[in-house]
Amino acid sequence: MTTLQNDIFLRTLAKQPVSHTPVWLMRQAGRYLPEYRAVRARAGGFLDLCKNTELATEVTLQPIDRFGLDAAILFSDILTVPDAMGLGLYFAEGEGPKFARPLQSEADIAALQLPDMAKLRYVFDAVSSIRRALNGRVPLIGFAGSPFTLACYMVEGGGSKEFRQIKTLLYRRPELLHRILNITAQAVTAYLNEQIAAGAQAVQIFDTWGGLLSDAAFPEFSLAYMRQIISGLTREHEDRRVPVILFTKGGGQWLELMAESGADALGLDWTVNLGRARQRVGSQVALQGNFDPAALFGTPESVRAEVRRILYSYGEGSGHVFNLGHGISQHTDPENVQALVDAVREYSARPTRPSI
């Protein structure tokens, strides 16, 4: 086992003392980087890139090399799991991910089965390859989509603005949605455990669409299945705890419920007040976030000011991983990302937080 040279991310998730606030960025390997665009052009397409172990490793390391971030995250996609379940993932130019065979009938849902993990071997091979290439520089994060978020794509057939199909199913035939969610939760549990076995040192569950749900529906249709996953995960590997980060976009009103899920940390989107979130659940979990990705469209000076504000909002002490409140935009200037990383380093390493 290679010695981890920079474990500040993992120590922060355990709320241990650290010298500065760690930083990584959701979707940090992506189209905003010219070096990523060059590799993707060589690969041929997004899925081709995901399935090419050598190139997936290369793009995962690009933001680590460029920005000196404190964690790497596997280059893949949350929709690999339903693809392995037979739904036929493809990417339409300008339209994003689509499924050729979405769940459109009761018969489709009845036929849904757990995937053969061998169909996802390319993901686990990438995890192992990335770990070797990192050689202990920083930890590697594995990830998966939440069952509800995956179900949205599986039922809608792709992205949606109204989510009419999934919500119709929820209110008309909740038992059918529960079948989808239960099978998907089992699949995600197995998928994340395979990532951990291959070398992922932390995992994040992306509940991108959980915030669409009503106050009554969220615990039943999203959180319950994330708790199911967390309870089935490998939590110790390579003589270390494997922390779990739970991120529900639009989930700020449910932090107390989420803090009881068994997760080590909660990701926050930019609509949440970080200081108040710490007051609410900071004694139970670490917090991650929550810079608005759109704020990276500003100037280096405005980026630094926003970093400063967020750090000040959290206050003194460990337990905060600096990140965006959602994935970085492809239109982001990399120089502003560098300004963000530099500002986190500068301001969080000071003996006292800056005043604003």
Image (tube, rainbow, N blue to C red):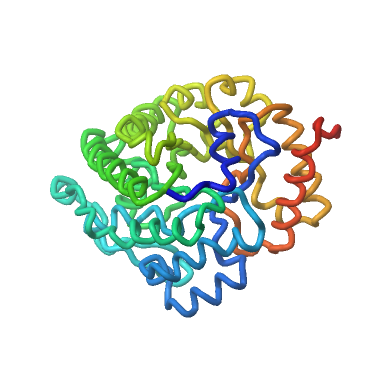
Q: Is residue 71 above or below residue 46?
A: above
Q: Nearer the viewer, residue 258 or 117?
A: 117
Residue at screen point 31% across, 61% down = 99
Image side of residue 55 versus residue 297, left or right? left
Q: Position of residue 229 (x, y in %)?
A: 33, 35
Q: Position of residue 180 (x, y in %)?
A: 24, 42
- Please report the residue visible at 64 percent of the width from the left and 64 percent of the height from the top: 331
What is the total number of numbered labels drawn onto the structure image? 0
* Left or right of 179 on screen, residue 95: right
Query: Compared to 33, does 311 lie above or below?
Result: above
Among the 4 quarters of the image, the one containing residue 297: bottom right
Extreme residue toward the right, this view: 355
Residue 141 coordinates in the image, percent (x, y): 47, 48
Q: Can residue 165 be seen by looking at this rendering?
A: no
Decide if residue 118 is in sight here. Answer: yes
Quadrant of the image for the C terminus? top right
Who is closer to the viewer here, 321 or 139? 139
Asked whether 169 or 332 is in front, the reply is 332
Q: Quadrant of residue 252?
A: top right
Residue at left offset 35%, top offset 58%: 123
Residue 133 image offset from top left, x and y in percent = 48, 62
Direction from residue 296 to residue 82 in the image, left or right: left
